[in-house]
Amino acid sequence: MNKSRGIYQDIRAQILDGTYPAGSPMPSTRALALELGVARTTVVTAYDQLLCEGLIETRPGAPTRVALVHPVAPPTGTKTEISRPNLSAYGLRVERIPPRYTPRSDELRVDFRYGDLTGSDFPTQTWRRALAQAASLACPTIAYADPRGNPELRKALQAYLWRTRGIRCQADQLLIVNGSQQGLDLCARLLLNPQDRFVMEEPGYAMARHLFMSVGAQPVSLKVDHQGLDTRKLTEVEAKLAYVTPSHQFPRGGVMPLARRQELLEWSEANDAYIVEDDYDGEYRYDIKPVPPLITLTAARRTLYLGTVSKTLSPMLRLGYLLVPEPLAPVFATAKELLDRHTPTLPQDALTALLQSGAYERHTRRMRRRNGERRGALLKHLQQTLGGQIEVEGADAGLHLLAWLPNLPVHLETQLLELARRKGLGLHSVTPLYHQATPPCIGLILGYAGLSLSQIALGVRLLAEVVRQVDG
Amino acid sequence: MNKSRGIYQDIRAQILDGTYPAGSPMPSTRALALELGVARTTVVTAYDQLLCEGLIETRPGAPTRVALVHPVAPPTGTKTEISRPNLSAYGLRVERIPPRYTPRSDELRVDFRYGDLTGSDFPTQTWRRALAQAASLACPTIAYADPRGNPELRKALQAYLWRTRGIRCQADQLLIVNGSQQGLDLCARLLLNPQDRFVMEEPGYAMARHLFMSVGAQPVSLKVDHQGLDTRKLTEVEAKLAYVTPSHQFPRGGVMPLARRQELLEWSEANDAYIVEDDYDGEYRYDIKPVPPLITLTAARRTLYLGTVSKTLSPMLRLGYLLVPEPLAPVFATAKELLDRHTPTLPQDALTALLQSGAYERHTRRMRRRNGERRGALLKHLQQTLGGQIEVEGADAGLHLLAWLPNLPVHLETQLLELARRKGLGLHSVTPLYHQATPPCIGLILGYAGLSLSQIALGVRLLAEVVRQVDG
């Protein structure tokens, strides 16, 4: 009797807090009794009580289902006593890092958030077919896979990198990672000690800066101009690693010219320092010629190259690749195994099929065309509506541009973003990407890959309205 | 001319080293010219040369394909100069850890390797359908997801943990991780500093020991008997964390009795130490009653609980979950975001569907039945064939048992394993799971989840042969 009361109370609480959603099937009394190790009658008694209360419903011949009830929050009786966590030095550093994730807001009519893609751009049919095929390949035994990633995928990527980026490498230098973020984590842990210094672009990719800082390393922020990292100050810097985005500097969009690339490489040789080249959106270039990555200039002695499918397929797949110098390959593989054994294999198989059949590059070209249209529309509307009030930077490549508002000083930023939000417009400032300096005026990162052409038009109109309001 | 020669040479090398496998389609000359940013005629010239050499084949109306050529190894002209890597302290520690991954050998007729599952046990149809359904859910925008994992999955797991393990928790305490290994990595990094001490079972799960040691922590190895960790010595130990497998000690299989559990919890309170409870095979128990996990005894103040689908579905999916005390939940979520943003979402959606529909538990029961049969067969054959020569331990639960060979001292181990390998039998010794001590005699971990009943019979027969040879 007491046991069935406990079961009843637990299920009741779970239905009320939405754990068992309305309409979902309840486990059969037999199954639940087996799981809980109690007599079936005990569960039947609990279910009867739930039925009485209208929390579950039965129909002849159908499984018992959860009735439509309104969840009540918060659930009671399960709060634990709060005590101060006993964290490591790493844990204490992580605690100070602002969490980045915010769910996409349904209230925004247009959100220029960078990193989002358009759902209908994803090749759903192709991917589903490739996944289904991979899932059907009968293998007699299921076992842990190669920590470096599926060998076929690494071969396919090796060929892809040569074809599309002019990179020559061995498949054994490639490591499949859970998105480029995990590649950065491997670099940070394996190459940086606490107190080591690393060169960081200012402004630059905040997630990389936070990550390198989380292992206790100290950023040396070097200014970025319209040609990427300004390498003149580099000679004075002693550091163990430099994080750079030479193909399309994030967020200012500059392409680093050859002379600077050579200075950077010379600096890395002189300092025995590693360079992490993040080619996060190398597939997207518009009016300009393809620029070979930094790594093609070197014998890959000190450059680690990061790529991802987050901008071509989807960031939710968490598929990236890290190309490391040969002497580093074994230790990176062991570390990857310690971190999480390996990246899930099914999506790796699906990506292999797409690369081998040419479907991946066809898709990438389609994406380049579509995002080229979005970019064109955005540039046109910005020019027409805000022509005299903005300066656009970094639109030659990638999936975003940077719009500076020279008339609006930074102290008006919060007001601008808040006004925009009230109009249903999501704006994202460049300020969090600065570490020591502040931007000269308000700067907005306008990501466009997640927007339709009409949303882009509306977004620019709303932007013009709020700029006028704040400026006026 | 020079350009097309370079393209020709690169493709030739890639065909010869197997990067482009025989029969695979080549990119069209138009597509490749676009990618490389060269004139189409340049690519056509290169392809003509490849055609001449018989490296590629064309047929009217079909894409150009790679001809059947025998790969030559190693490829030339891309070797980089080897220089001593400049690693962090973490990197240097990782370098000393033996890489664990070995591909499954096709030459073995029977391999008792622990962790392998039988391919046909995987619910291919169900999983494929769930994946396809998840992939088809049209969402207007693709964006980075919640670092803690899909909220629906965490709710479904909350209910599942209560139903099957008697655990009461909030969905917000759950973190979806890339297999339990990533959960261990989060614990190691966030809770342990270099030089901190951690309690480790002896013998115990080597991957956990290596992981905690990789962050610089020092193991305090405490002996394990047939009831799991021997807690008597615990009072003398100062440590910051204890790693335990109380439901089914790995590898000896003991179930920790209540009195020891209470001693462990009291120790953790007195030391302000965390307990990491690895419930790696909690779904599998045979003749015994279900044992509630350690975490159900506490208010979850200092216990972190790890679960996985690696033993029920597949280790290749890399899906696990970590249940943390409420005060730790935010810092674990931020760390997970820094590590790799989040776990891939599609497989999370598929697992949610399986949990909500009850298919997961039906599958688990089927797996328990099948593995119960394998276990029964293994026990029967061992008893019949090697009855007097072995002592079996830890067979009440899980997917492996430990077979001690009291007549065979440890120095004969290499010989035994080598002889077995020559007969096509894969054996795995308990020795690597010891850190300071050595086993009293040869001990074999016999994993049976990846074997058919006839393989089990054959495996025991071969085992008896090699035991007789070495013993004789």
Image (tube, coloured by chain):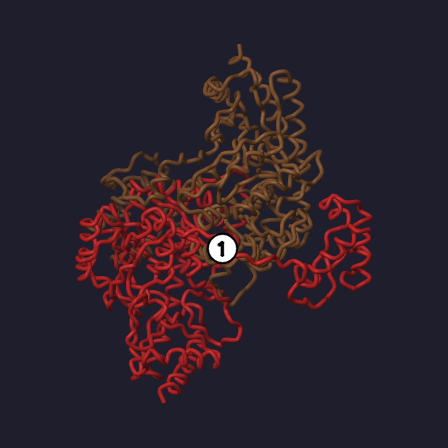
Chain colours: A brown, B red
Inspect this view and state whether residue B123 appears: yes
The foreground one among B353 and A22 is B353
Q: Nearer the viewer, residue B80 or A31?
A: B80
Q: Please, which chain is the residue tagged with disc 1 on?
A: A
Q: Label 1: which residue? A: A332
Q: Position of residue B192 (x, y in %)?
A: 32, 49
Displayed quadrant of residue A227: top right
Q: Residue at left 58%, top 36%?
A: A231
Amino acid type, label 1: Phe
Position of B304 relative to B236 (above/below): above
Q: In the orientation shown, which residue stands out farthest toward the top?
A: A472
**Is residue B375 positioned above or below A349 on the image?**
below
Q: Where is residue A96, by image quadrant?
A: top left
Where's residue B308, x and y in %? 39, 55
Q: Position of residue B53 (x, y in %)?
A: 80, 63
Residue at x 69%, y 40% (from the top left corner): A290
Say which of A183 and B25 sits in front: A183
Residue A352, image x, y percentages: 61, 54
Q: Specify whether residue B152 is in view.
A: no
Residue B407 sits in quarter: bottom left
Q: As drawn, is A182 to the left or to the right of B286?
A: right
In the picture, measured across the screen, residue A343 lies left or right of residue B205, that is: right
How many dots with numbers?
Answer: 1
Q: Label 1 neighbourhood size at 10 Å, few (<14), some (14-19), many (20+)?
A: many
> SS for tag 1?
helix
Q: Where does the C terminus of chain B fall, quadrant-wise?
A: bottom left
Examine the rendered structure and indicate whether residue A54 appears above or below residue B317.
above
Left or right, A182 with reference to B435: right
